Every structure is written in C-alpha cells, then in structure tokens.
Amino acid sequence: MENLKLHKNKNIAIYILTLLFSFIFIFTGYRMNRVELNNENSIGSYRAVVVSVDDVTEEEIDYGYEKMSSKTIRFTAEIKSSDLKSNVVEAYQFIDEAVGINPKEIEAGDKIIISQLSSRTNIEENVWTLVEYYRTDAIIALIAVFFALLIIVCRKKGINTIISLIITCIAIFMVFIPSILNGRNVYASSVIICMFIILTSLLIINGIQKKTLCAIVGNMGGLAAAGILTYFISSALHLTGFIDQDSMFLLMINPESPLDLKAILWSSVVIGSLGAVMDISMSIASAMNELAENVESKNFNIFLKSGLNIGQDSIGTMTNTLILAYIGSSLSIVLLMMVYNSDLLHLMNLEMIVFEIIQAVIGSMGILLAIPITSLFSAYIFSK
C-alpha cells in the first residue's frame, strides 16, 4: 500500500514537472524565435452578419473567346468584431462565371468575413467586399465534440491526450515554425521538436513507467532511422526540395538568406511519420507491459518473440494508414498530373510525386524499424 502511494505521488510529481518543462520550453522557444511578420500587404478582415440583400446586378463580359455573365450582389452587413463592432456597412459579393466554382450567394443571416478591398467593377472607391464565409464556430464545435468523445471513452487518459495535443500544436506553431522562419538550422530544430513531442506526450499520457521508457526508446530509434534514410535517399535522387509553387514563395520570404528547401523536405518526412511511429512503439511497449504483469517466467526470448509478433500484426494496418493518409492529402495533385501528363515515365520522376512516395515509404520504414528496436529494449527491461 505504501509503495502504491509512493508510486502515485511520483507520477503526480513527474506529471507536474513535465507540464512545467513544456511551459518553459514553449515560452523560451517563442522568445528566442519570435518573428516580426511583414503585414504591409495584409488586409484587415472583420467578422460580420448579413442584415439584408439589397440589390443584384448581372452583366455579360466578353473575354474574346467566350461571353460570360458576372453578378454583383449589394448587401448590408453588421460588423461583429474589432473596434468597428456594431457598425452597419454596405458591402458587395462578386460572382464571376469565368471562375470555375463560386461561393454560395449570400442570404440574410449568413455569418461572413468582409474586408475593404480595391474596386473590381464600376465602383470607384474602396468598398467592403465578401472575403469568406465565417466557419470558426463550426470548427470549434467539431473540436469540442472530438474532445468530449475522448473524455467519455478514455476518461483520465482522454484529458491527458487533449493536454498533450494542445502542447504539441502550440510547440509546433510557436516554436518550431518560427525557428525555421528565423533562419535556424532546420535539421536541429526538427530533432529538438520531435524529442520534445515524444517525451512530453508519452509522459503526460502514460506517466513514468517501464512501458513509457520502452516507447520513448523505440520512437527515437524509428525516427532516427527514418531521418537517416531520408537524408541519403534525397541526396541519391538529387532532390532540391522545390516540389510546388509554395516552395517558390518560401524562397521569396528572405531572398538574401533563403530557406533550405531540402531540409524542409527532410523535416516533413520525419515529422509526418512521428505519430505513426509513436503509435506502434506505444502499442508494443503497452502489450509487453501487460504480458510482464501476467506471466511468471520473465524470459528475454519469450518477450522478444511476443513483441515482434505484436509488431507484425500491427505493421500492415499502420503502413496502410500512413500511405493512405499521404495519398488522400495529395489526391488533387495526383489527379491533375494524371490528366495533364500522360507520359507515365515523366510523371513518376517528377519531384512532387517522388516526394510523396518517399514520405509514404520511408515513414513506413520508420514504423517497421521501430518494431525490433522497441521489442528488443522492452524484452531487456521486462525480463529483469
């Protein structure tokens, strides 16, 4: 009983120390990598509600090759945010047939985002125009439902998972991304953020246990393998990191000291595979922990064989999960490439396609290599 109480107090202390460490890491990283963004060309956007639709004007525009209709909708909106709150303004929505897909025509009661932009038609002065529909409330509701389900199904671990997820997102957006924009070494930043996510996530969710230690070692081993493989493969395939037009915009951020696109490509593969590697490592370590608590003979070979068997059962679904996730995220690009480039040889050697293949394959190899590393270390720990 005394040992149980001591163990519980130890876990609480580790939990609090992990949260404190996370706060210090994020605060210090943010202060070190704070980025002063250039907002000269940004537009001021305001949340608003459509009060009424006042007028709809249609005209035909001759593009030379074809005549297409254009529609201008004048409406009244009440601003709901910032220092202009409660101001009622006249605004416009422009719908052009030349654009493939236009947003839904606004109606009274719609929640929207408006901004003052330069004129598009025959209106001479700057006018309020529709920028986007306001969707934040729906996103917040969706996330709230997800969090509620986590708590209902997983209870205490669900709450810890939410805390871990929030810390991970804050660390990436407030420390990792600013560090890259600040010109820090992308490889070093990626390694540091991955180690931080692994340590904090596993310690917050599972506490200080043997299975947590085994999962951490398996994670780091699998990611190290994925990182080394990515580095050598990208060099062997002569990848530049210039995979789409977004890469060009990244180079334009700081022309005097451009971002290292190859390093960003490497980081994308490693961070992209982090979640899956963490999952397989924790699954093996957790199963081995249960096995150790329910068998009398703590034999190294039995534990090792069990760990490998568990990993083999999981590898098929985990690999499918990772590959399908990458295919799903780049489906639009693949469809465009297939339609507009019938030369399969050229298509399969495009850097954009090669990068997607590398992400999927090396991510899966990271999972695969995490299995023996976690199994070996777990067998050693639990056989003692």
Image (cartoon, rainbow, N blue to C red):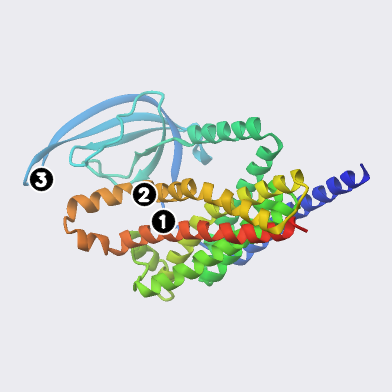
Indicate which disc residue 38 carries. none
Does label 2 or label 3 sit earlier along the sequence?
Answer: 3
Q: Is residue 297 above or below residue 32?
A: above
Q: Which mark is residue 360?
A: 1
Write down the residue under mark 3.
63
Neighbour class for label 1 at 10 Å: few (<14), some, many (≥20)?
Answer: many
- Please say whether residue 150 is visible from this viewpoint: yes
- Disc 2 marks which residue? 327
* Quadrant where the image shows the N terminus: top right
Image location (x, y in percent) of residue 104: 31, 31
Residue 298: percent from the left, percent from the top? 75, 53
| Amino acid type of the residue that numbered disc 1 sits on in the rendered structure | Ala
Name which of mark 3 and mark 1 comes first in the sequence: 3
Q: Residue at x 61, y 48 (%)?
A: 283
Secondary element at tag 2: helix
> 289 or 309: which is nearer to us?
309
Left or right of 370? Residue 118 is left
